[in-house]
Image: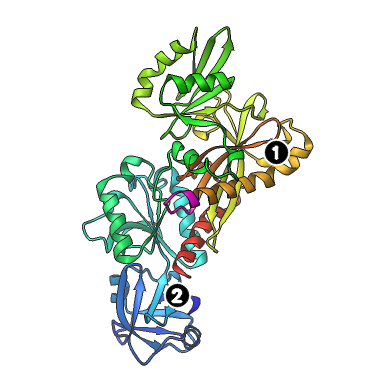
Amino acid sequence: MSRTRTTISLIHSAGLPENDIKLGDRLIRQLRIPTDAPIQLAFGSFKQEIRVSPGGKSKSLRLNPSLFSKSGLLPSSFMSVKYFPTERILRLGPLIGVMVSRYQPDDPAKPFGSISSFCLEMVNACKKLGAYVYFFTPDMIGTNPSTLEAISYHEGWKKVTVPAPDVINNRLSTRKLENSPSVQHFMREVKSRFGTHIFNEKFLDKSDVFEALGPDPKLQKYLPESHLLNGYSTLKKMCGAYHTVFLKPVRGSLGKGIIRITRLGNGTYQTMTTSLDGISKHSYPSLSKLFGSLSGKIKKTRYQIQQGLDLIRINRRNVDFRALVHKNKNGKWAVTSVVARIAGGNHFVSNLARGGTLSPVKDALAMSGIPQSLKQTAPARMNQAALDIANGLESALPYHFGELGIDLAIDTKGHIWLLEVNSKPSKSENAPLSATSKVRPSAVRLVQYCQYLMGF
């Protein structure tokens, strides 16, 4: 099995039959493609019997305009090509589909909302690496899973008809969309009919993560004590054991609805709850009174109760760290970036959506006040923790992930803790801290992993 990349060019020639393609002599030899018998051309779910004829010194793959139209290919695309001799298939790709929540054609600057710039980076990463990416919403899924209406970038964002992809990156932003019957049916169909790889196929609940990692002795050192809040006895036990505890919605995101409970003394307690406007504070004369005030919320929302930690702070603001990990070009978990997140002035959570700010890890550690020896070792230890957690989740959960946002924290003694894991990490929070980068490393890693999955 051989591998190379070549530029695909459209030939406007009446003399080129529809099912013939021309490939440079050197590429034919390199790929060991037969020219004396038909083979199949494959692009995503599209397959067409073709014949390959020599194209002299050309470094391009040349197709009849009709074949371009039928396959969904675009002229002048930079595409990887690989020949599978056993199946007699010449495959182009990988064809990557990114499933997104919305498309807004009336807003050309942000057609995909907050992830628009990242989508364009994916396009540029594909051009650089030799792949093809398009974007589609659940509304674009039709009754025939072999073709999709989708959005691709070719001198601007345009709607196109394309084959089902080789690989799908699920970037749906809500569980409601992800669990909709049409999306679930589509994912089952393309998996079974075309062998499509789908990664980040599921949101992770906070309880899923801690239950999955808890039994692994290697990972227990990263885990603060954490339980599903299933009644007053659990609250009493945790508040008795720790001065501060956090209640986190099991399916929450962006720091919404987190409640911090602090034991003040004399049996009194204070709650601080995140909201769009900042923090709301309430005091209670007893834990039972506090629980009574929460009973309505607990009936509607499942909460995880988690041990409070004495974390490093900068100017009295909490600091945590977002480690972004990806499967790399060899199919192994690798740390792509780690950034520090400093909580906003009126919040105890660090999410950017709640006024948090980003900082390079070394700068945040330098301002944190922890001993110099811990500052020096913390970056490497955080990288190792992120890799341990990613590998642990992969071993424990029956889902396919190619990208994870792992939120870590460091306490004042230098111990590293896991806060939570996000299977749909924000593309705003993982933006490069250097404005000169046109394609952030996470986009490159995603494309490389898709190439790995398809053997390119």
Q: Position of residue 98 (x, y in %)?
A: 39, 54
Q: Amino acid at mark 1?
A: Asp
Seen at 47% across and 88% down, the residue is: 25
Q: Which one is in front, 253 or 377?
A: 377
Residue furthest out toward the right: 372
Q: Amino acid at mark 2?
A: Val
What colouring method underlies this structural image?
rainbow
* Left or right for 383, reference 54: right
Q: Earlier in the sequence, mark 1 or mark 2?
A: 2
Which of the 4 quarters of the picture holds residue 417? top right
Say which element carries label 2: strand
Q: In this rendering, does residue 279 appear at all? A: no
191 over 57 or under it: above or below: above
Q: Position of residue 300 (x, y in %)?
A: 34, 25
In the picture of the structure, the residue carrying the numbered disc 2 is 81
Check residue 363 in the rendering and tell me which mark sits there, or answer none. 1
Q: In this rendering, does residue 300 appear at all? A: yes
137 over 353 or under it: above or below: below
Which of the 4 quarters of the picture holds residue 431? top right
Q: Which segment did they paint magenta?
A: 394-402
Secondary structure mostly seen in magenta is loop
